[in-house]
Image (cartoon, coloured by chain):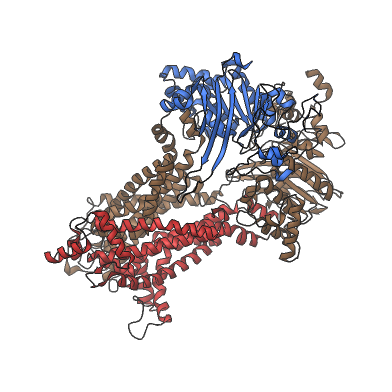
Chain colours: A red, B blue, C brown
Amino acid sequence: MSAYIFKRLLALIPVLFGLSIIVFLMMALIPGDPATAILGNFATPENVARLNAQLGLDRPLPQQYLIWLGNLLQGDLGRSFALNRPVLDEVIERFSATLILAGAALVLCSVLGLLAGIVSAVRQFGWTDRMITLFVLIGISTPSFFLGLMLILFFAVNLRWFPASGMYAIYGGGDLPDLLYHLVLPAVTLAAVATGVIARLTRTAMLEVLRQDYIRTARAKGLSERRVIYRHAFKAALVSVIPVIGIQAGFVLGGAVYIETVFQWPGIGAMLVNAISTRDLLLVQGGVLVVATSYVLFNLAADIVQSMLDPRLRR
Amino acid sequence: MHSTVEPLMRVEGVERIFGGRRKLFGGHRAGVHAVQDVSLDIMPGETLGIVGESGCGKSTLARMLVGLDQPTGGSIRFKGRDIADTLRNDFNGLARNIQYVFQDPVSSLNPRKTIRSILEAPLKHLLGLGRKERAERLGTLMDAVNLRPEFLERYPHEFSGGQAQRIGIARALAADPELIVLDEPVSALDVSVQAQVINLLADLKARFGLTYVFISHDLSVVESVSDRVAVMYFGRLAELGPARALFADPRHRYTRLLLDSVPAPGKPIVACEGSEGDLPDPYDPPAGCAFAPRCPAADDLCRSQRPALDAGAVDGAHLAACFHPPLLTGETAGDGQL
Amino acid sequence: MSAVANPRSSGRPDAVRLMLNNRLATGGLVILVVMVLLALLAPLLPLADPNATAPANRLIRPLSEGHLLGTDALGRDILSRILWGLRVSLAVGISATLIAAFFGSLIGLVAGYAGGRTDNLLMRGVDMLMAFPYILLALAIVAVLGPGLINALYAIAVVNIPFFARNIRGVTLGLARREFVDAARLSGKSHLRILTGEILPNVAPVIVVTMSTTVGWMILETAGLSFLGLGAQPPQADLGSMLGDGRRVLFNAPHVAIVPGLVIFLLVMSINLFGDGVRDVLDPRLKSGALARPMGRTAIDPRAGDAMPAPATEAVLDVVALKTQFQLGRKTLRAVDDVDLRLREGECLGIVGESGSGKSVTAMSIMGLVPTPPGRIAGGTIDFRGEDLLGASDARIRQLRGGAVSHVFQDPLSTLHPLFTVGDQIVEAIRAHQSIGHREARTKARDLLAMVRIPNAAQRLDAYPHELSGGMRQRVVIAMALANDAELLIADEPTTALDVTVQAQVLSLMNGLRREKKTSILFITHDFGVVSAICDRVAVMYAGRIVETGTARQVLEKPAHPYTRKLIDCVPVLGQSDRRLDAIEGLPPSVDDLPEGCAFAPRCPFAQPECRKGEIPLFALADERAARCLFPLSAAREVVDA
């Protein structure tokens, strides 16, 4: 097992390397003069020239990349001109807020999705199954940003149960209950689509597994239906659902862009949208790099969990 | 008797290793030795049976004979010409002479093509026949495999396994080849249909003067169709000889075990219990005879040295790679052997 | 394969569900068509100018005069803007889908077919793109290209290429290994011809399905970018940017946001519904609704079981007039019809037949292991040691399963759970029936493995099934079946998947164990050689019925039914290679379309007109010997024929 993990960690190196190349090229391929693009149209020619030299933009591309990578490894992602602070500081601050939101949503959608999928498969064609199928359909067809707006309208404006925006109350907040209180609506919104996808896949996977020969063997051994379904079938279904949860993590991390905008959550998604509008490209680059890296790491974790469940994958 | 007739195909020291590349950080990753050092001749007009259990390399060998796979060592000559050369220039040149019948009749037919377009492909691409000649030839082919001509417009899923296999045979016949390699052609069929196909193959062989390489795991089927038989074990030839002699007096302990294992009325069950009956590790083949761990007669010689194919030979036609072959009928122990 | 072993081909949803599925898809299609038509006709409809601002009329509520859906913050007519916006959203979504489908499928096809280095290179690139969270990558692309509708379109298309590429590659890879590709190669087709002529037609449905399931997302995602202000730029509007505008006035005029939001929802939902319908039609493998889940026990017709009182016999198993049927749509397959079996203590009874003869279904019916749906026991009685099994409670059946009655199935790889060690699986079987601790059960499991002659039993307990050879796996299954001292062992083709030398080992093992433990065995097989090796008595089945029974010796040496005779003769026997095989002409009948009279009559060389009429009973020929034939073969008859 540890050999497998080590192998997976080794395989991570080229992926992260490729990732850095793409992110680097993102900047290099910006049409027109990058320095002008970075500094904005009203930058003075001296500033443009200074930045060009500073970024080494007058050198060939591979060399530029190596310089950039060197800076990156020292934790230097450049400076955001709009915020006038190091990109790394801003990104880390924002990313922790996103992690809270996305983490909560991911837990929520995994638990709810798996539960709904199992119940749906076990009660196949019953009314519970039909209700779940209907909710799943609505869930995956609703734009999350629209759902967020509607939840605000209903639960924040009409019922006044939850706050409409922000991460903490402006006055006197800042503790954990306050955070959770602010977290409910955005986390639910963010989890909605992923819950639907996971539920759907769990249902299909369970139904697929329940017709396998080894389930018949389990029954022929005289095991209770409960044991057959929750031990034998669920474990096998989980193996095919876990990679889906890994992929959903990507959707949740990306979807945070909308949800953070709608709920004014001070995360990295909202930061990216602002940075794109203000053409603060170094900030965009840093943000993308961090989120993508975290996604890669998460998928690695999903792979490892999957191989812990399935001995056939440990090779 | 071999010297008078030139073999149609000559397989010499053929080897096929899968995988096995240099590792990223030094060292050499071992490959799977699927086929090793196989040499045999296929005489015109004969049926050569190749028999062995799963994983013995018989299908890999079959695929190399038709050019669907290339050996990593040794050579295969068809009418004296190395097929590797033929393949380099013109794959179709080989396909015109050597054809193949697949094990799974249903999966060897494209589900989205009519039988007509499946059977027309070799006529068009291999023989370059015009429309009219093709129609004529299609009629002959369907007749040869006892299928009604109106089946031509149907799709594969409308056929039973036996019918689908007849179509597979018709396709192999279409290009008018000299040699047909049949890879487990009846294993996927129901017993009552197997006999139909076996009989059909015998009729076609007589009618068109074909040469067959017939691969199967089923000893009784191989015995009933073959003139000569090759027994494979763990990628190598264990025994090669005329069918009758080989089945009556096997000269390899493995062949003996195979024959004894086939259940038949009035015969007690014989089971070899030596060392789990498992095959050796294909990544790390043993130095000696691969069958030694299961063999009742194995000694240090068997475990340390690999027997050559003539180690247990009776004569030039009946060869066996065994240091301590079972006795022939009428032969008595005490000729200085084991 | 019998119906039990392969329920996929026979498993269909009930008609109601099928209709509901269809109705949903049809509903989706209707909504979709209406929306597309409205979008297409927008220029011709009497609509207000979508971009004409009228500050005096700002934020009018819906259902007002002149403004059916109200107006937005600039006083523009929402209905008109919605229809024009719908045009834009549809156009962008569909174009993005087409672009992604084209490039993605191309990459997938080439990578999957070429394999090797090309595949590696292409898929590494695709993996690289997939290392980015979906929306983030789209954002990054927009960041580079700058906000705008066309740039958003490119971004969404690029982001979806990997998805198509992966899907199509997977399918292509599977197809490229199929034998028909090799066959086409040997038919002289070039690689390009094979790719376009053989593989593409099989991949095309998958491309269509993938498109129909992704176009909804793509519309959502473009709307999302516009919502964030990165897609459509004013004055041009798509549904997403309208929603974004509405958000600014959410609290005082929610309709400005709700209307475009609902339209997006309706559009995406109708596409998803329709897409599911398309998928169900084109890709049966993925049919989510059609996979019926087999229940824990076969459904039993309430009439079954009370037909006759259980005869008091010393038999271990007594099956009388068993009928098991499969309901497929409107068709009823009578897989097992009127089957009688009796099995004494320590006896081995073989059931012999070809695929589809009902032999496995008979065996699986005994402990209710025929999958329901579609299977159902429609009549008869099954008694185990005088106990009525069809009338027994589920709890009682569970107690017997794996306890007094155990099973060995055909393919030991698929019958063992791949994710548990063999030790765990045996321990579980023991502890389901004996109240002993885990440690004790494990010791017992080790002894069982040793009993079935598995070397290093203690270490093998921790092996997973895939780490063992086929023969070893089947020994594990047998060990598991013997864990609770079963009185009856039901073995369904236990050696068919094994090599002949391994088969001999397993047969000898089973034979030894049954003599030692006096276990009764019901042995299902298609191989008369195997029958002769292990069975005391035989029942031959054809088209769901027993056509002949007797001792193994009698039946093999002097078959009475022409089918039995033919079935024996059409199999080559070692040492008799000169005999031309006596093939049975024709094909076995399908059990949903049986001829009147004897089911074998159409293939029988001795059939008389009487054979094709009425019900033909099982005639007793001697003690324990019977044949379902009006003209059973006798020695005299064979002489005449010869």
Q: Nearer the viewer, residue A216 or B65?
A: B65
**Place of residue B298 in the rendered image (x, y in percent of width and height, measured from the top left):** 73, 38
Near-viewer residue (C531 or B8) = B8
Residue A6 x %, y %: 49, 59
Is residue C83 among the parts visible in the rendering?
no
Q: Relative to residue A273, is residue C470 depicted above or below? A: above
Res. C53 in view: yes
User: In the rendering, at what x and y percent does residue B331 appear?
Assistant: 80, 25
Point out the residue furthest to the left here.
A45
**What residue appears at the point 61 percent right and 53 percent down from the top-left corner?**
C418
Q: Is residue B330 above or below residue A313?
A: above
Is B72 on the left-hand or right-hand side of B49? left
Q: Quick one: which residue is furthest to the front in this view?
A: B336
* Residue A66 sits in quarter: bottom left
How many numbered marks does the figure carry? 0
Quadrant the N terminus of chain C occupies: top right
Residue with the most extreme bottom position: A172
A207 with respect to C589 (left or right)? left
C635 or C467: nearer the viewer: C467
Expressed as whole percent of the image width and height from the top left, the position of residue A225 reads: 65, 60
Quarter of the image with the C terminus of chain C is top right
Residue closest to the eye, C174 or A218: C174
Q: Quadrant of residue A17?
A: bottom left
Q: Quadrant of residue C436?
A: bottom right
- Left or right, B239 with respect to C250, comes to right
Q: Residue at the far top: name it.
A: B4
Q: Is residue C317 above or below residue B49?
A: below
